[in-house]
Image: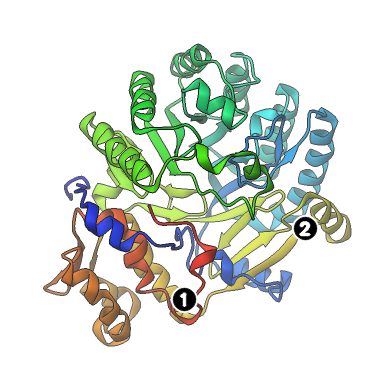
Amino acid sequence: MKQPTQISWDQSMIEKYNYSGPRYTSYPTALEFDDSFTEEKLLTSIENSKSDKLSLYVHIPFCAKLCYYCGCNKVITRHQHKADQYIEYLAAEIVKRAPLFKNYLVTQIHWGGGTPTFLSPDQILRLSALIKSSFNVADEGEYSIEVDPREIELSMLDTLKEAGFNRISIGVQDFNKKVQVAVNREQDEQFIFDLMAKAKELGFVSTNIDLIYGLPHQTPETFAETMQRVLDLNPDRLSVFNYAHLPARFAAQRKIKDEDLASPQQKLDMLHQTIETLTGAGYQYIGMDHFAKPDDELSILQNEGRLHRNFQGYTTQEECDLLGLGVSSISQIGDCYAQNQKDIRPYYESVDKSGHALWKGCSLNRDDEIRRVVIKQLICHFDLDMAQIDEKLGINFEEYFSEDLKLLQTFIDDKLVNITDRKITISPTGRLLIRNICICFDVYYREKARQQQFSRVI
């Protein structure tokens, strides 16, 4: 078993390489999806897939309030009947899709959003029952849901437990009141602590906390206070995201004043102290913006070389195909990716017309599949054994990636990457820049200089 991931902060290297790049939740990235991808291609990929396990992602787009920082796919409303209508369309999509997976066992379910807990207890139980009656859902599995702590009762956790969820992810973002007001996301701190305590009492096996650094009025000092409160919460996992201010793309962000935002150096300071605080408190750095306790499955699988990454970020079940249900959701099945209609009206129209909402996607060629394996290995484990890749994929690594290895040379020169005995190892300093290193193996990125379409890597 490998040693847990170590991180070393080098300000000059981070500044040198802090340019935009993909997050590699897939390869090829979603920028390569197009609407020439057909239902027939998806059906062929399902038929040819070697997997018999399935991960379900269910997108619930509704939010009662608009968080000004948010770039997610969402519908702002307080009308509960809109969720009833949406569940009807989800049901129609499930009726169309579920029979295609009758030979699969569902071992992972995640509800994301939007705000899944926008749904009433009755709606949650109804949708959960529909999924369980339509798919072969394992008794034991990872069943998680994102929770907004602002407009729910503590009893919502009883409902989630009854629905079969055993993991929750709570969107906290920041405990500082001034920051909360500036992004229109005020929440009660004590309620979040009560929520965590009740989740533990009810036997939820894992809790995740989401935070964002770089929001208006945040400073390294105020964010350090938030981090201390988070350590008091004692979650199993943390996601600490970099706020990307793109008001031209996301209208809500225009309500955030540029002058209220932290400077680039302050953002780096927040990230640096966050890494030091969490690793100092015993959390393992998983990669990019994820941390987990040493006994968490993410940490264990990373140390065993078996960590996986998909559209839900770092995850645990490599052998699963992923089926996305609902507006904008993405599936990863066999040798293809498929995305549903991104906006709710076209989603409804597509389901009415054909029973499904397929919008676009892509089929992977042999080169895509080879590069996907390499990028996933690096982004999950920070090392790669060329001999193992040769054996797995039937290639000669140095010959196949001769151009890519030339691009890697600048990282080698800067001691961010080491190649010895046909093994690529990312240094503790290089691990924070793993997205940049993966770009060297991304042929699409090279062919199209589209840096402006990606978020900055730090």
Pinpoint residue 365: horizontal percent, then vertical percent. 51, 80
Task: From the image, tell me which residue sits under label 2.
Answer: 356
* Left or right, 302 with reference to 63: left
Tag in front: 2 or 1 = 1
Residue at 65% in and 34% down: 116
Residue 458 sits above or below residue 368 on the image: above
The residue lying furthest to the left in this view is 421
Mark 1 residue element: helix
Report x, y in % for residue 357. 76, 58
In the displayed structure image, the side of residue 429 where residue 316 appears, left or right? right
Q: Residue at x 46, y 80 (%)?
A: 366
In this orientation, which residue lies closer to the viewer: 419 or 47?
A: 419
Count the marks. Answer: 2
Q: Nearer the viewer, residue 328 or 123?
A: 328
Closest to the observer, 205 or 245: 245
| 147 and 190: which is toward the camera | 190
Residue 378 % position (x, y): 31, 62
Q: Amino acid at mark 2?
A: His
Describe residue 138's horizontal placement relative to residue 353 as left or right.
left
Q: Which mark is residue 240?
A: none
Q: Which mark is residue 368?
A: 1
Few, some or many C-alpha atoms within 10 Å of disc 1 (few <14, some 14-19, many ≥20)? some
